[in-house]
Image (cartoon, rainbow, N blue to C red):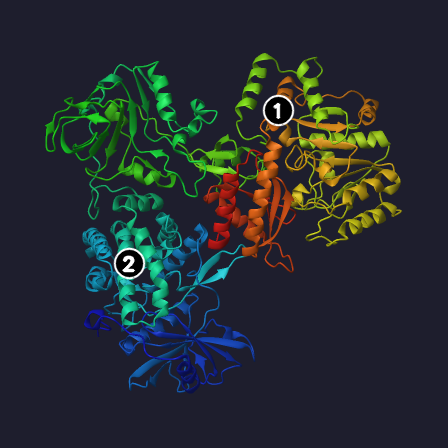
Amino acid sequence: MPGFDFFSGQGLVRPDITAADAESMASSLFGITGTARELGSQQDRNFLITATGAATSAATGDSAGDSAGDSAGGATQRYVLKVDNPAFSAAELAAQDAVMVFLTERGMRVPQPVRGLNGLSRQHWHATDAALLPVRLLTFLEGPSLEARGYLAPPVVRALGRLSGTTSLHLRDFAADGLDRTLQWDLRNAKTVIDLLMRWVPAEETRDQLRAIADSAAARLAAVASVLRLQTIHGDITDDNVICRVLPNGHHVPEGVIDFGDLATGWLVAELAVTAASVLHHMPDNPLAALEAIVAFDEVVPLTEAEITALWPLIVLRGAVLVASGEQQVQIDADNDYARHRMDAEWQVFAAASAIGWEEADAAIRQALGRRPHTGAEHTTVPEHTTVPEQTTVPMIPALADGDYEMLDFTVTSPALADGLWQTTDAEWRLAQAALARRSAAVAPYGQFRLTRTPPHSRREPDTFALFTEVFLPAGSVIVAPAAASVTEIGGDTLVLTLAGFGLRIGGIVSNLVPGAAIAAGEPVGVASPVARVTVQELARPGLPVPHFTQPSRAAAWATLAPDPARLLGLAPQASVVDPAIELARRGAMMAAAQEKYYERPPQIERGWQELLIDTHGRSYVDMVNNVAVIGHSHPRFTRAVSDQLALLNTNSRFLYSALADLCEHIVATSPDPILDTVLLVNSGSEAVDLALRLARIHTGCSNVVALREGYHGWTSASDAVSTSAYDNPFSLASRPDWVHIADVPNSYRGTHRGAGAAGEYAADLARLLADPDGPGADLAAFICEPVLGNAGGVVPPAGYLARVYEQVRARGGLCIADEVQVGYGRLGSHFWGVQQQGVVPDILTVAKAMGNGYPLGAVLTRRDIAESLAREGNFFSSAGGSPVSCVAGLAVLDVIRDESLQQNADAVGRHLAGRLAELAERHPLIGMVHGLGLYMGVELVRDRDTLEPAVSETAAICERMLELGVIVQPTSERQNVLKIKPPLCLSRESADFFVDRLDEVLQGGW
């Protein structure tokens, strides 16, 4: 017997029931006393019933429900009271009850019907208007839905798709009366529903747009509708009808399904279309984010060719039905706040779905699923692309036939785009003109990810992939038809031809042809315009609208619709083959697992410029972590200095050359005190710390070294021995040699001592350690720490701490070592060295990283008498540390820091950044503290500002999301819950703002 027919009565108004009515129903029909709070619904009334104490009469069906009611005596129980619209038959409601029991038996997490006092799950209530209303009580699934979430991470979208597929897999075995329904949500009825409800859409222009898009979708769907699989479907597995498990990183993973009100027979693929559509309003600027759900669904229930063809039209139709139905509902049911609240999201679904062309969407789905592109077989809608036989093809541009042309390289690795040339608006033209001075033509091939199209700050992928070939040649150069063709369109400087099974769009051409004209192979179609920049784009289908550039994530799909036209020009294909996954696999095959890498799916970074890093797809990222590149990536002055010196000489420091003394003099000139007047050059921070420890032990004749807990100083045997970070070495504290002693880290935010007296208390702790008979005091060689705790995320020790500690150490004959490898060299802005900020002078100071701007270079700066102690154990030199090239690199860095006022920039931009982050912290409780100075900062993320529970998983997930938005930032600290901020010192105010704006976006919208 047929069930509800939407078209017989159209709009459904919810029953007129109050929360007080719901409480009466729960009590009188089910024996449950509790409070009621209304939940949203389009056409029913749903109430959350919260009851205290066990209900004596209510019981679930044969299968146990999943609800708070499972807890023992006296605990709060929660239920959902459903007052169904009386338009729905008893058979329809019985089927919904039965399917919940069925799916529970299949191991799924779904609500369960609760029997009333009379033993039946379906009850009735006499409304004030004498209507008899069906009433049911369901167990309540604890947990949040996805509806209120902003951004949905790919794993979350995949989980949603998988849950939809799993439900569909089980429902194909479910049958019951009451499933033959004519619902407005059944996408088989979508076009009819839209036409019927179109009048409710207020604006005429909007109605026209909605109608045109829906008509186009329906026309595409009609070709395959007859062969789409039918089965029982839930019909509404969406972001607000799933219940989630919340992971430690904050991701909401769908694992339960609720609301079976749309259960009916329908198209299997419609289940997926509804699920995928619900993703779109979470990421309206990236409709293809729904591909994650589509792939996950297909892994459970493989889609047929016809279903793939139907899928995106169904997603669009779902969006159109949502907006048309929503507009009707808010007008016929003015008090329906739920429907009104959903309207913005529903319009976003429609807008996002309709923003993607049919051909691109179909190609993207097929590419994501690993299915072949359209072949022209039955149920496909894009004709097969017919390749022009080679023997009948005539090269389109005769000027290229003699080979006197140059291939242009606009890619990320192009040497011609050095020194920031890629950022100039005429970079392509300048490179082309230089090539034309050497050759008669220049070709920018199809498929390059053009660096010249890369913006410096972009929260979305830029359109860098070229879907055409561009030829620069003299104006008036002849262009001919590659094969027999007809003119489809001509306008401005563009000519569109139709050939055998495909199209051809030629730009930058002057032509006298008219639409409809027939041209033979080799016949001229025009000449190069005065701009002398001819574009050639092949179209898999004549008339197909194809952009010149597309985003890297959409390139594979578009490449099936606009293939490389090289053969039509007589050229060999030159398309870029760039796959970071392949490079990651190569790396994994050759390198040890201990070698760290950033990100789960890292981009392949092949270029840097100033504070930007650029991947092989032409995506730029603001680099907030590279303290090594202190003066900025690829600084022209630095690269020229190193290159020029390499062309002259590179040897080791046992030879005599001027660059060695030049560098040492410059380093001494920066010294925090004239007493530090001697330099020893090495090639890394680990070597510098290792040498510093060796110097201290030789000079003092003692062995013991005191280091701070949670510190990191390097990976050589000695520097690792004083590294106490449990993150870098989980067994660090237990595996230290007996000459290393650990003092508490002076972290006044989350450490042992906090507040105004923290410096004295931490210093007192060290005094007790030194005085301990079993402690290090009697044989003390050195105390080592960072003057600003870089490994902790830029934590500044409390004022006066280092002065007290240095005094105690020296009183016992020990030396004070300042590890400035991370925090020195002007990074703090207000001071060149961290010890200056603390008001102390160390005996030995180590520096590296920034010193060579990425070139292997480090140094130990100390007193002459300490340095001379090294002679007791023989001679010293470093092959790379004091080489001519290393020295020139070091000199260039110091000169640029001085001449470009980078220390002053670190101070100014750092203050601006700190102010903006402080304002962010006022609005986002996840930010517990902003540490640091200048451009060495840390944003510490905590789950609770009172307990300071570290938000470890959230920090990692936020970094992944920031990468998607164009920012490279990473976790640091012992707990990995601090966003480390240590960018190149040339960081601009604009880049700092871009970083903060993206962080704000993530903290507001989710990760």
Specify whether 241 is left or right of 935.
left
Q: Is residue 4 above or below residue 869?
A: below
Judge left or right: residue 774 versus residue 879: right
Side (left or right) of 375 relative to 336? left
Mark pair 1, 2: CA separation: 62 Å
- Kindly identify which numbered label has been placed on residue 931: none
Secondary structure beneath label 2: helix
Left or right position of 981 against 680: left
Q: Nearer the viewer, residue 992 or 106?
A: 992
Can residue 877 be seen here?
yes
Mark 1 secondary-structure assignment: helix
Label 2 sits on residue: 318
Where residue 684 sits, quadrant-wise, is top right
Crowdedness near tag 1: few (<14), some (14–19) or many (≥20) residues, C-alpha within 10 Å: some
Residue type at mark 2 is Arg
Mark 1 vs 2, N-terminal side: 2
Q: Identify the amino acid type marked 1.
A: Asp
Q: Image point 42% across, 71% down: which residue?
A: 111
Q: Residue at x 76, y 52 (%)?
A: 758
Q: Is residue 185 visible?
A: no
Figure check: 318 above or below 956: below
Choose top left, top right, bottom left or bottom right for residue 824.
top right
The answer to whether 183 is drawn above or below residue 379 in the figure is below
* Residue pointed to by mark 1: 895
Q: Position of residue 874 (x, y in %)?
A: 80, 21
From the top left corner, tell me how far across and down residue 922 is, in percent: 57, 55
304 or 214, which is in the foreground?
A: 214
Q: Identify the image quadrant of the N terminus.
A: bottom left
Q: Nearer the viewer, mark 1 or mark 2?
A: 1
